[in-house]
Amino acid sequence: MSELTNRAKQRLLEELLAARSRRTAKAREPKPASPQSRRHKSSYGLDSIPGFRQMRLQKSAADLLELQNPFFQCHDALAGATTSIKGREVLNFASYNYLGLNGDPRVKAAAQAAIERYGTSASASRLVAGERPVHRKLERALAELHGVEDAVVMVSGHATNVTTIGHIMGPRDLILHDAWIHNSALQGATLSGAHRLSFPHNDHEAADRILQDQRRRYERVLILLEGIYSMDGDLPDLAAFIDIKRRHDAILLVDEAHSIGVLGKNGRGIAEHCSIDPNEIDIWMGTLSKTLSSCGGYIAGRADFVEYLKYTAPGFVYSVGMSPPLAAAALASIQVMLEEPERIERLQARGRLFLECARDAGLDVGTSEGFSVVPVITGNSIVATKLSQNLLERGINVLPIIHPAVPEKSARLRFFLTSEHEEQQVRDTVAITAEELIKLQSERSSLRELAVRLAMPKTPEP
């Protein structure tokens, strides 16, 4: 079926809404005008925000097709390998709790002790309100984890990329990034004012060709990679990109959000996995909200560069310092992870098992290497959404990633593995997923399905 123009999509959705309105009109009693209906019609009010009206149409179309919203599910308790949703226990494949450290008694005890000593807030920017010992202990532990000189922690992983990239690059510079780099890196690039170019996913040869052609036009070049790509669960050829950064006199930043605690024998990330000196990378970025069961982000690297960020990066200087109990939880998580490498070994085994079972079942897992993230690609946003809904009914919680977060042909479910998943849970999940997907794929697409497929709301990316 050929692609529809934007105008045709809009008209199609409006026709769907009009049809629903006609069917329900007879059942409605006349009502006095609501305050909302009496609002002043402004050409530049909230309704003028790009995409706002379109999102409302998308939600109405989903309602028309009786598609449940898979997002913002309310969990009743701790979410690990299993979770409770509306009082019902289900298998959980929608958690970044890769090593099961969120809820570990030692981690909870560390957070509780920090509350008793320091309270719940740093109260102001660390630059002016001062440090707590746990802040520096955490930063030293992160630096040691990466094998570099120092680190600085910030209150948000997303903001860490935004403020760092936005701060160190400028209008006369070039930012070259993988086409599937995280939104936080793209926002930082936009903030910087630097020229931005992308290369096809994991294609280091294409990145090299771009720099051969473009490098002389710019003062500085920043290359952006991820250790594990969160949409596909695959890895870059780190050695090749280090060679490129050397030859083209560039800065290399690697985002380890999904690879700390996942890659390497001791969970130290992609450098350990690839047996590469971590000092070959200029900037390590990571988050504390995944393996390290806390909240926030960090930059690790040279001590003088870290000091520069502490005095000048807006997202650090003008933001409150990290909450002491969160810093304590992250520090305790690092300690437990290093003391118990069997957690990492178990996680990697579960990831391999899921990948093998999925391939044997004929599921499309894309380029995943089977560590912590394995997609099941449906190639259709409505199939992905319905599949998520059907799996939840069968006791499996996994969320869809749909257009426009990914191209329509790449719509998928994204399974996150943890060290706490049992082998049989993995096998059963793959078998049920394959069974439900076959049922959905046997159904003929309808015009309504096309409408939703072309206009589903963008999936949030944490």
Image: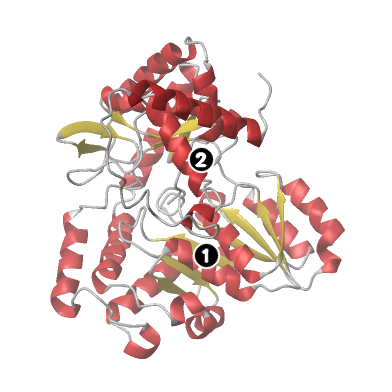
The picture places residue 282, in percent across and down from the top left corner, at 61, 68
Residue bearing the label numbered 1: 161
Residue bearing the label numbered 2: 233
Residue at position x 15%, y 63% in the image: 109
Q: How many marks?
A: 2
Q: Which of the marked residues, 1 or 2, is nearer the chain's N terminus?
A: 1
In this rendering, is residue 311 above or below 438? below
Q: Residues within 10 Å of mark 2 (few under 14, many from 20)?
A: many
The dot on residue 231 is none
Residue at position x 45%, y 77% in the image: 316
Q: Amino acid at mark 1?
A: Asn
Q: Nearer the viewer, residue 167 or 360?
A: 167
Figure quadrant of residue 405: top right
Residue at position x 36%, y 57% in the image: 289
Image quarter where the N terminus lies is: top right
In this rendering, is residue 135 above or below 443? below
Q: Amino acid at mark 2?
A: Gly
**Label 1, label 2: how many angstroms apart (C-alpha)?**
20 Å
Residue at position x 53%, y 83% in the image: 312
Q: Residues within 10 Å of mark 1 (few under 14, many from 20)?
A: many
Label 1: state its secondary structure.
helix
